[in-house]
Amino acid sequence: MRYRDDDEDEWESDSYDDADDDLSDSEPTRDCPSCGFEMLEICDQCPSCGQWLSREDSRSPSQPRWVIIGALLCLATLLFFLLLQF
């Protein structure tokens, strides 16, 4: 890591150990679905691309299963009563 000493005009270089930057094996990680960046599992937002990773944001746009089943049951009941009248 480079820093500047106020007493000197030159930049000085320190040795920097980047081994601490790597995610350790004991911490659970996941990949961002948007950019593929590896991050901690507890993150709610990707530090690389800024994509929110909450469950509300990742829901599929389709209707919940109970809505579809309820609509099918209503249609089946309606058809049953219509066929009974004939």
Image (spheres, rainbow, N blue to C red):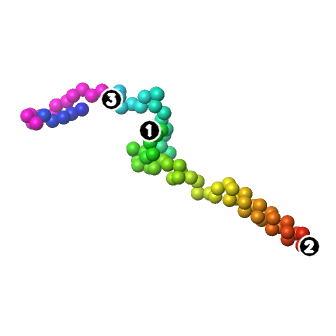
User: Residue farthest to the right?
Assistant: 86
Q: Position of residue 2 (x, y in %)?
A: 21, 33
Height in image: 2 above or below 74?
Answer: above
The quadrant in which residue 48 appears is top left
Closer to us: mark 2 or mark 1?
Answer: 2
Measure the alpha-carbon separation of dots 2 and 1: 64 Å
Measure the alpha-carbon separation of dots 2 and 3: 80 Å
Q: Amino acid at mark 1?
A: Met
Q: Position of residue 41 (x, y in %)?
A: 48, 38
- Please, what secondary structure does the residue beneath circle 1 have? strand
The quadrant in which residue 38 appears is top left
Tell me if mark 1 has few (under 14), some (14-19) or many (20+) residues whose alpha carbon lies within 10 angstroms of its own: some
Who's the residue at 68% across and 59% down the image?
67
Closer to the N terminus: mark 2 or mark 3? 3
Q: Mark 1 and mark 2 in contact (Cβ < 8 Å)?
A: no
> 47 or 83, which is in the foreground?
83
Q: Is residue 67 left or right of residue 83?
A: left
Q: Give the residues drawn in magenta, as a range.
A: 6-17
Q: Amino acid at mark 3?
A: Asp
The kind of secondary structure the magenta stretch mainly shows is: loop
- Please, what secondary structure does the residue beneath circle 3 have? helix
Who's the residue at 51% across and 53% down the image?
57
Height in image: 76 above or below 17?
Answer: below
Q: Position of residue 14 (x, y in %)?
A: 21, 28
Q: Which residue is mark 2?
A: 86
